[in-house]
Image: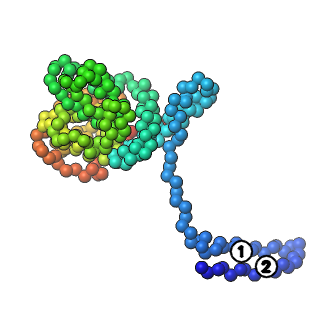
Amino acid sequence: MRTPTPEPEPVVKKRTKTERPEKKPLARPPRSERDATPPKLVAAQPPPDLHGLGEGKHLTAMQRKMASKLSGARFRWINEKLYTSTGADALALISEQPDMFEAYHAGFREQVKDWPSNPVDVYKGRLEALLNEGKRHVVADLGCGEAKISERIRQLDPKGKVVQVRSFDLLAANDRIEACDIAHLPLKNGTVDIAIFCLALMGTDFVRFLQEAHRVLKPGGQLWVAEIKSRFNDRDGKAFIETLSKLGFTLTQRDDKNKMFISLDFSRGKDKKPTEIAVSSKVGSLLKPCTYKKR
């Protein structure tokens, strides 16, 4: 290794009152330091998890308020990550930090408190009505969250003899949920009667989720979609419906009476293979990421 040559000592000279001192040039660091690889940037981290802390009786009013703000910030951070990542990346994120799953859904529960109704409850009611019909149905709840739909149906039909609900999401937070990337379901072709996306078309490749739903649905099977109205670029969902048509689905029912979300029912066509669609080019024009304002 080459040793740097030491610099000569500066000559000290006397100066008059009007004479300014000479500026000494800044010494350069040794070459080994100048050529060193710069440190890697640390990845952005979510705000701290204070779930449940804000309800502690031992906290002051100011502490509870601060805990609530931090919990809200954490929810918004996770929400943005899930909407701007692929399904595979979201699965990896939640698998590495499973506490994020509960933190997200705790924040989501706070958000829906202000809604006039929750589409999860609407779908519960529709499936309860199928129990009375007695006809066998296999249901796939895709992006199920806390699997509340399955929880309700199991209370009424514990063995799933009439309506069997299989619930899928990024983390098996309870015994009702199967963890997976929704673009790659552990289901055989044509084995599902009803597929549900209840506020669950998240991520940059959600079109793949819809293609996967087409694969697992039986010909003539139903696809139920509920989404926030503000996510549709054209407000009436026309572009979204047209894309679903290309994927092999036909719109059978539309309900937009709720001020918060639109419910769309589709029927799976009998064609074995739907039209191929460039996933990345379609996402932004169909549904915008769902964001929440700071409170």
Q: Is 12 drawn above or below residue 79 in the view shown?
A: below
Residues tagged 1 and 2 counted as in contact (Cβ below 8 A): no
Whether residue 50 is visible: yes
Mark 2 residue element = loop
Residue 109 as seen in the image, left or right of residue 210: right
Q: Residue furthest left?
A: 270
* Dot in front, 1 or 2: 2
Residue at x 29% of width, y 51% of height: 281
Numbered badge on residue 66: none
Identify which residue, 192 or 229, lies in the foreground: 192
* Residue 65 in the image: above or below residue 201: above
Measured in 3D between alpha carbons, the distance from the residue under mark 1 to the one under mark 2, in whole angstroms, is 11 Å
Q: Amino acid at mark 1?
A: Pro
Which image quadrant for residue 90? top left
Provide residue 259's location: percent of width, then percent of height: 34, 27
Dividing the picture into quarters, in which one does residue 115 lie?
A: top left
Identify the residue at horizontal 85%, vertical 79% (top origin): 13
Tell me residue 178's x, y (percent): 31, 37
Residue at 64%, 74% in the rendered image: 30
Q: Along the polypeptide, which appears first: circle 1 or circle 2?
A: 2
**Residue 223 occupies quadrant:** top left
The answer to whether residue 30 is left or right of residue 116 is right
Classed neighbour count for the residue bearing mark 1: other residues with Cα under 10 Å, few (<14), some (14–19), many (≥20)? few
Disc 1 marks which residue?
Answer: 25
Instruction: For the N terminus, give its image quadrant.
Output: bottom right
Answer whether residue 224 is visible to the viewer in this image: no
Residue at the spot of label 2: 10
| Residue 44 coordinates in the image, percent (x, y) | 50, 49
Local SS, label 1: loop
